[in-house]
Amino acid sequence: MTASSLPQVRRIAINTGGGDAPGLNAVIRAATLAALHEGWEVLGIRRGYMGLLEGDVDGEPGVFPLTANAVRGITHLGGTILGTTTRGNPFGLEVRQPDGTWGRVDRSDEIVQRCRELEIDALIAIGGDGSLNIAHALYQKGLPVIGVPKTIDNDLRATDVTFGFQTAVEVATDAIGRLHSTAEAHQRVMVVQLMGRHTGWIALQSGLAGGADVILIPEIPYHLDRIVEKVRERDRSRRRFSIIVVAEGARSADGEASFADASGRYGGIADRLAAEIGAATGKETRSLVLGHIQRGGEPIAYDRSLALRFGAAAVRCIREGSLGTMVALQGNDIRAVPLGDAVHDLKRVPPDSELVTTARQLGVSFGD
């Protein structure tokens, strides 16, 4: 849709979907204020698309006006004032069947129809690969959409960086740094599990910055004996402790990623590795799962600034009629890229990348 064919914009909506990330509120604030500056009305949709499907969400209106007052003072806040969910895919929404079992139904047409009833001229969908795939599918059904890339995993190929990533790296790096003193005091091996289901960007960058001895990422399958040898090598050099950083989706060369439960949710690899390393080396080995601490809290300045730029750029895309796109950071500039291209493939860590090469030069083992 071009600018010349775009109807006059009067009302837009904003939603956030998938896992939360530091900087979501900054996007909401920037997009709201920029849209109000254009003279448009702005609606907030609660918990992804659930606010459109339900009359209210947790006792609050599912759709409500976003005013300048509603977004005042939220740039520095973690989380999202709109709420979010990882179970709100309208193309396969979980519902209880008459017989009491759970099934999935496609309610995507209701989303498009509800937006038309509310006279929403464009939707700014803030999310990661899953949420943006949903947004792209809705765009193909006729819903005018602009995507904003949000994921702490930094795994969207079309953008150099996603907001939330740098904050997650800072949190993880601080935690790794704090483990050095206690690991050295007790001569322990510490296995730190970080988020990263399919990509190892957080583990790689925080492990490198935090001085990890071993970094395990999904892109480089590991061998247990190589990890054990690294621990023994440090012992021989009188460095009788080791810090091992592992992405939750890392896998051994002869096995699969570790799963926490039957739903396919990743987890458990730190506990498993700690037990295996302890048994092989005889050293006291402890595990730590940093988990959702990486998602919580205030965004650092970089993520606040990037999120504000993304939010304002999304409004410019609507004004210019560049719909069905995602705003992306490429070099120093924010650009609009086709949404379909943006969600086509994940951005994975190249095993021969400069970051990996640097880590190897510093003596870091990847277990390969």
Image (cartoon, rainbow, N blue to C red):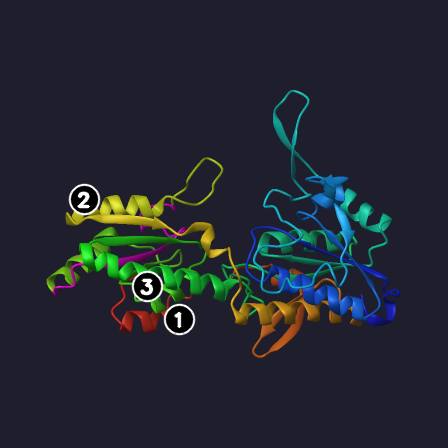
Where 60 sits versus 366, above or below? Answer: above
Mark toward the start of the polypeptide (3 vs 2): 3
Where 180 sits versus 264, above or below? Answer: below
Residue at label 3? 177
Residue at label 1? 353
Separation of residues labelled 1 and 3 (CA atoms): 24 Å
| Circles 1, 3 touching at the beta carbon (< 8 Å) | no
Instruction: Report if residue 342 is visible in the image.
Output: yes
Q: Amino acid at mark 2?
A: Ala
Q: Helix or strand or loop: what does disc 1 sit on?
A: loop
Q: Residue at x 19, y 54 (%)?
A: 186
Give yes or no for residue 30 being in the magenta stretch. Answer: no
Position of 282 compared to 367: left or right?
left
Q: Which residues are magenta?
A: 237-257
Give yes or no for residue 246 being in the magenta stretch. Answer: yes
Q: Amino acid at mark 1?
A: Ser
Q: Nearer the viewer, mark 1 or mark 2?
A: 2
- Looking at the image, the residue that sits furthest to the right is 8
Mark toward the start of the polypeptide (1 vs 2): 2
Residue 126 location (% of width, % of height): 65, 58
Separation of residues labelled 1 and 2 (CA atoms): 33 Å
Position of 205 compared to 40: left or right?
left
Position of 12 compared to 129: left or right?
right
